[in-house]
Image: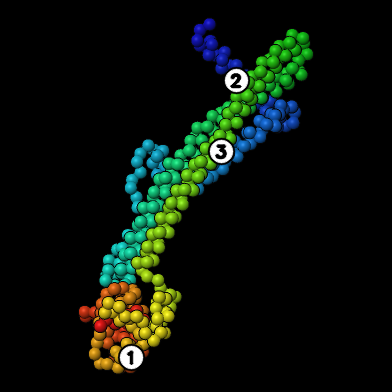
Amino acid sequence: MNIMDFNMKKLAADAGTFLSRAVQFTEEKLGQAEKTELDAHLENLLSKAECTKIWTEKIMKQTEDARIEEFVYEKLDRKAPSRINNPELLGQYMIDAGTEFGPGTAYGNALIKCGETQKRIGTADRELIQTSALNFLTPLRNFIEGDYKTIAKERKLLQNKRLDLDAAKTRLKKAKAAETRSSSEQELRITQSEFDRQAEITRLLLEGISSTHAHHLRCLNDFVEAQMTYYAQCYQYMLDLQKQLGSFPSSYLSNNNQTSGTPVPSSLANAVGSPAVASTSGIVITSPSNLSDLKESSGSRKARVLYDYDAANSTELSLLADEVITVFSVVGMDSDWLMGERGNQKGKVPITYLELLN
């Protein structure tokens, strides 16, 4: 027998087997043929594997949404181009805006500080994505593209062996002649043996799902730790930013709606109502008596700014914490305000944001 004859006979046998399986499958669907049921333990293992595959894919998809571009480049075996992420882009816009408005202004300075913090958050975000991809996504993807593909292949083979077995049973039932019956019984023994062997192989593979779950649990812990690190970093960055900007009450944050009222920093809320505040190192904290003296005098005084202040309109002067300005009283001005002067800039300033210097 030459190779061509062998190949032709093999193709004919394969076609016959395929046709036999197709007929058996169709008759089962139509209720015209019996179907060998898998044992309950094997069915449970198959269900567990399918459930693991479905949920692993869903978790991967949601986790990979944040790094889809990097994933595509990985598939192409190319390095993804360095691309700025959203927090970094927002931070850069804030820094550019603050520079445009002027670092010396309260708003400009605050924008720059916020921008720098946003860029730090962007860096932390990038580190979270990289860590998650390595310690969490990669093991999940290895399961889907490796272990589960092997399981699916063996499961398909088990299905074919089961169809062969049931087709052999059907032929045995239909056999009339003794010779045909003897041949059918031998075929049944062979298909039963092949089915049992494939069922055992599939079962051993499926029992490895429990080990997969244990491995994925460790990966999940790594993912949670990475997130804890990320959120702790972000929280610390925001705490630092809050300290830089100062703590502002609602009355200050809504100063754009104010006309004559004076915003009162929370740290000075009690001090303003007290008769005097302690004086140290030659600096006198503003108190009602000091202000009265300044209001009644026609001279000017130097004052240190306690907190950043963003002017509500063109009649006010924006302030930057720790800067020293000149202040003086103007006849008819509201008692909670003084006139402030910084170089060629002049405008109203809230007295509760100042400490007069000797």
Give residue 7's position: percent from left, percent from top.
53, 14
Determine whether, in the image, residue 129 is placed left or right of residue 347: right
Q: Do we see residue 259 in this rendering?
A: no
Earlier sequence position, callout 1 versus callout 3: 3
- How far is mark 2 from mark 3, CA to CA? 40 Å
Please state which amino acid type lies under the numbered disc 2. Ala
In this view, the mark in front (1 or 2): 1
Please state which amino acid type lies under the numbered disc 1. Ser
Helix, strand or loop for disc 1? helix
Label annotation for residue 226: none
Out of 261 and 82, give the one closest to the viewer. 261
Measuring 42% from the left and 79% from the top, which residue is drawn there?
269
Please state which amino acid type lies under the numbered disc 3. His
In this view, the mark in front (2 or 3): 3
Q: Do we see residue 192 in this rendering?
A: yes
Q: Residue tagged by mark 1? A: 292
Out of 13 and 107, give the one closest to the viewer. 107
Q: Residue tagged by mark 2? A: 15
CB contact under 8 Å: marks 1 and 2: no
Give residue 317's position: percent from left, percent from top.
30, 80
Earlier sequence position, callout 2 versus callout 3: 2
Q: Residue tagged by mark 3? A: 213
Determine whether, in the image, residue 33 is placed left or right of residue 248: right
- How far is mark 1 from mark 2, CA to CA? 107 Å
At label 1, counting other C-alpha atoms closer than 10 Å, the crowd grade (few under 14, some 14-19, many 20 or more) is few
Determine whether, in the image, residue 245 is placed left or right of residue 223: left
Give residue 15's position: percent from left, percent from top.
60, 20
